[in-house]
Image: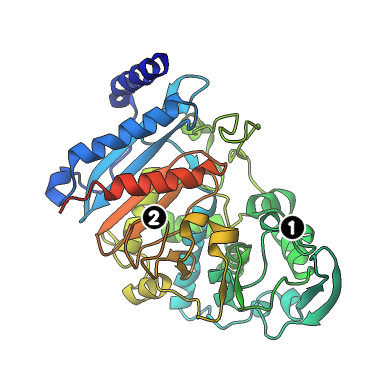
């Protein structure tokens, strides 16, 4: 009873402070849920569920934006921006979006592809000679020791970078002898190395698989981001700001959060609610040694909704065209042939198990999955706890921002999915 009273009191508190939260500019005109085939009553359950989780110290807070049929029907903040300080969450809160950086880098590279400056079958070695003679590791039965190296059957291509078939895997996503030679992940690499040092490190390690044979999560979009820099003669952050973020009105998306915006930077819980161990996210208030395309940006729900709406609208947001219609269709179609071993649910995200993969985004290809959605749904989440998806069949775009970096993030991806889809009533 005491716990129940705490939850009720917390929910009441949040209903009082929510109107006080600073509002960011809406990415779309608002509408009543019923006007677009959704239920206000059912959407109201989202707050009860999330704030119950916040009251039980499972989640610090979050922001959820839902758009359907070109209208914003739900854009709300829950819980705390900083739970320890008692600071309420606000809709313009800034979050580490981790691998949600990858689709933005994919879009940047696709702009260059549209201009004929970057081809899918270009070998990566065309841009970085260090990758010209890659070798593949041969390991012992336990995969603890590299016993030999054999030449790669073909070169790593630009398409491999987009779709995680390059075999440039994350060191933190496995325990083999090859994994132990590689950086843990994108952010860790960018903190420790310059772009040139990073490329030296990757090209000096034998590949885990033959290129093109296996989907395994890794550094493909980081390397692609460095190709964007090489071709554009700009840093990745400058290119994205000029060609993607500014045209879309994404005013709060950065590789380094400006000092005047730090007050809106959300904090994770200091203790992982599942393991009881300390947890933290790298602060994005200081620059890394290179702008990592695999996971080094911060953004808001409103900003990322603009990006997702652009993809949902086949490359257009408002009066700004970022990509051609056919390019977006190409990006969001499955690019994994039947003979490619797909480990997306093992080394990527278990909530995307059984999905295919396009160019920087996961693509649902069948009814077999751990969440609802529709065939054709596309997305890619962030290890910090953030998530988004576009469901073309339902004309639905959803962005969820939260700092829950442990494995509990997979639980919330499934919960938010179920709560949103149950609210569709047409």
Pinpoint residue 244: horizontal percent, then vertical percent.
Answer: 42, 59
Q: Which residue ends up furthest to the right in the rendered image?
A: 147
Query: Seen in the image, is 189 located left or right of residue 205?
Result: left
Asked if one can make out residue 23 in the rendered structure from this viewpoint, the answer is: no
Query: Seen in the image, is 93 located left or right of residue 99?
Result: left
Q: Are marks 2 and 1 in contact (CB under 8 Å)?
A: no
Q: Which mark is residue 3?
A: none
Give 9 or 250, whichever is nearer the viewer.
9
Pinpoint residue 73: horizontal percent, then vertical percent.
Answer: 22, 44
- Residue under label 2: 371
* Few, some or many residues within 10 Å of mark 1 (<14, 14–19, 20+): few
Q: Which residue ends up furthest to the left in the rendered image?
A: 35
- Residue, x 66% and y 80% (percent of image)? 126
Pinpoint residue 163: horizontal percent, then vertical percent.
Answer: 53, 70
Determine the CA span between mark 2 and mark 1. Answer: 29 Å
Q: Which mark is residue 175?
A: 1
For mark 1, give the secondary structure: loop
- Residue, x 63% and y 81% (percent of image)? 123
Pinpoint residue 303: horizontal percent, then vertical percent.
Answer: 38, 47
Q: Quadrant of the N terminus?
A: top left
Q: Which residue ends up furthest to the front in the rendered image?
A: 1
Up the image or down, 269 lies above or below 294; here it is above
* Few, some or many residues within 10 Å of mark 2 (<14, 14–19, 20+): some
């Amino acid at each position: 009873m005491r716990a129940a009273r705490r939850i009720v009191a917390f929910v009441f508190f949040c209903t009082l402070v929510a109107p006080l939260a600073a509002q960011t500019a809406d990415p779309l005109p608002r509408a009543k849920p019923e006007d677009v085939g959704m239920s206000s009553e059912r959407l109201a359950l989202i707050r009860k569920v999330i704030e119950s989780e916040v009251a039980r110290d499972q989640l610090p807070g979050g922001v959820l934006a839902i758009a359907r049929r070109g209208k914003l029907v739900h854009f709300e903040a829950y819980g705390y921006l900083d739970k320890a300080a008692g600071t309420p969450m606000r809709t313009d809160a800034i979050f580490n979006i981790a691998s949600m950086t990858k689709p933005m880098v994919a879009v940047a590279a696709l702009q260059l592809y549209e201009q004929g400056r970057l081809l899918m079958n270009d070998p990566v070695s065309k841009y970085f000679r260090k990758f010209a003679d890659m070798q593949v590791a041969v390991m012992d039965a336990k995969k603890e020791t590299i016993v030999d190296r054999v030449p790669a059957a073909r070169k790593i291509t630009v398409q491999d970078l987009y779709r995680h078939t390059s075999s440039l895997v994350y060191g933190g996503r496995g325990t083999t002898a090859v994994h132990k030679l590689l950086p843990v992940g994108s952010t860790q690499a960018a903190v420790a190395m310059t772009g040139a040092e990073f490329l030296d490190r990757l090209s000096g390690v034998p590949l885990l698989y033959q290129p093109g044979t296996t989907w395994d999560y890794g550094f493909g979009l980081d390397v692609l981001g460095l190709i964007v820099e090489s071709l554009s003669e700009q840093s990745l952050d400058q290119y994205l700001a000029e060609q993607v973020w500014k045209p879309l009105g994404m005013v709060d998306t950065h590789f380094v959060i400006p000092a005047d915006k730090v007050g809106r930077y959300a904090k994770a819980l200091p203790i992982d609610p599942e393991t009881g161990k300390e947890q933290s996210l790298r602060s994005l208030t200081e620059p890394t040694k290179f702008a990592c395309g695999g996971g080094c940006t911060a953004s808001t729900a409103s900003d990322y909704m603009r990006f997702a709406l652009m993809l949902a609208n086949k490359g257009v947001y408002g009066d700004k065209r970022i990509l051609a219609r056919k390019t977006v269709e190409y990006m969001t179609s499955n690019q994994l042939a039947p003979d490619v071993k797909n480990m997306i649910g093992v080394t990527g995200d278990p909530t995307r198990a059984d999905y295919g993969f396009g160019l920087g985004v996961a693509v649902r290809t069948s009814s077999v999955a751990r969440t609802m959605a529709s065939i054709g749904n596309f997305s890619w989440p962030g290890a910090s706890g953030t998530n988004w998806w576009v469901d073309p069949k339902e004309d639905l775009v959803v962005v969820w921002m939260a700092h829950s970096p442990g494995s509990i993030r997979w639980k919330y991806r499934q919960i938010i999915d179920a709560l949103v889809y149950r609210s569709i009533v047409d």
